């Protein structure tokens, strides 16, 4: 029996189900985005996050809707691979239940389409999206640094390209709260919606004063602590300090902390450049502060395009595409 020739444009599907967002993305053979949808998970007013069970349930509801939209809007696409973030990081003990709905959905699509399923990590997806949206060029398997700044991660890592994915080794990580948790808990305390990042940035921009309430930065061997800074911000709030000044001070101490982490990385590894990814990396106040403080060394930093700094499936889809390219050789 002779099968009919395949029709339609080739597409490479990526799925990511993080603690904040359900994401689906399809890229072409050249890496161009053909379809993309994201849905933020619903968090009740005043809450500072979701229990894993509630996040898992929302992904279970969201994924069929996003995949139905893909089928409706791009029925012409001929899916060649399905990639999914199956765990947070490239570590043996790295696991979060929220990634299970994405894996189940990806397995179903891959099996139904008769195409390979590529498993990667949420962090690798951020790295791939960051490299794709900056002018950083990674030669062969030479190492580079990445700083992943989000609600669930404050990781400074060395990365080496291994096939379609990345081998990641931790240089430093948060000792308690992650940087995004610091942002969100401060924002909710100040009455802002969750996730609070854009709102806190807007509030800080309204502060025109150079002298700000003191929030100390704590970094030991490259590993930051944000529990102390959160306590300091809370004390300022309870003492009647204005939300604008607290917001500005919080973003300033985050920039100072990032600067200390970078200095440690450069001293320890001598590796350049540094790719910054994750939702906190899109903050313009932090970027401007780093530019002011680092001077010429700021050129060593490469920031992911803001639209793809937050959780997304673009990088995951690109990893699936690269895996397909390698298997086709």
Image: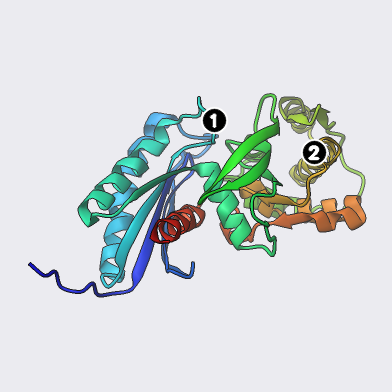
Q: Residue at x 33, y 73 (%)?
A: 9
Q: Report if residue 278 is visible in the image.
A: yes
- The answer to the question of whether label 1 and label 2 lie on touching residues, with beta carbons closer than 8 A, is no
Image coordinates for residue 131, horizontal then vertical, percent: 62, 57
Residue depicted at x 41% and y 36%: 98
Separation of residues labelled 1 and 2 (CA atoms): 20 Å
Residue for badge 2:
269
Foreground: 20 or 27? Answer: 27
Instruction: Give the residue pinned by disc 1.
Output: 91
Where residue 295 sits in the image (x, y, percent)? 91, 55
Find numbered disc 1 in the image and state the secondary structure of the residue it sits on.
Answer: loop
Depth order, front residue of 283/95: 95
Picture coordinates of residue 31, whole percent (x, y): 49, 67
The quadrant in which residue 100 appears is top left
Tell me: 121 left or right of 24.
right
Q: Quick one: quadrant of the C terminus?
A: bottom left
Secondary element type, mark 2: helix
Q: Point out the residue furthest to the left here.
A: 1
Quadrant of res 35: bottom left
């Amino acid at each position: 029996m002779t099968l009919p020739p395949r029709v339609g444009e080739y597409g490479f599907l990526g799925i990511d189900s993080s603690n904040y967002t359900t994401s689906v993305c399809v890229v072409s053979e050249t890496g161009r985005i053909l379809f993309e949808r994201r849905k933020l998970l619903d968090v009740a007013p005043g809450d500072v996050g979701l229990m894993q069970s509630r996040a898992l349930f929302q992904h279970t509801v969201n994924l069929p809707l996003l995949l139905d939209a893909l089928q409706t809007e791009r029925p012409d696409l001929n899916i060649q691979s399905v990639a999914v973030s199956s765990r947070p990081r490239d570590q043996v003990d790295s696991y979060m239940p929220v990634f299970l709905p994405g894996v189940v959905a990806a397995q179903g699509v891959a099996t139904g389409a008769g195409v390979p399923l590529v498993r990667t990590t949420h962090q690798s997806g951020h790295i791939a999206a960051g490299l794709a949206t900056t002018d950083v060029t990674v030669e062969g398997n030479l190492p580079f640094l990445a700083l992943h700044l989000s609600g669930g991660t404050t990781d400074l890592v060395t990365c080496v390209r291994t096939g379609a994915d990345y081998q990641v080794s931790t240089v430093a990580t948060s000792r308690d709260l992650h940087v995004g948790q610091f942002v969100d808990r401060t924002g909710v305390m100040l009455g802002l919606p969750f996730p609070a990042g854009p709102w806190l940035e807007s509030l800080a921009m309204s502060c025109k004063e150079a002298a700000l309430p003191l929030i100390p930065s704590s970094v030991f061997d490259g590993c930051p602590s944000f529990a102390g800074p959160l306590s300091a911000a809370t004390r300022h709030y309870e003492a009647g300090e204005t939300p604008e000044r607290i917001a500005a001070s919080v973003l300033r101490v985050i920039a100072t902390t990032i600067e200390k982490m970078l200095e440690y990385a450069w001293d320890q590894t001598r590796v350049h450049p540094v790719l910054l990814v994750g939702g906190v990396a899109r903050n313009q106040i932090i970027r401007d502060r780093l530019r002011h403080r680092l001077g010429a060394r700021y050129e060593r930093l490469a920031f992911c395009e803001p639209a793809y700094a937050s959780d997304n499936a673009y990088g995951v889809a690109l990893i699936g595409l690269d895996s397909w390219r390698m298997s086709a050789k």
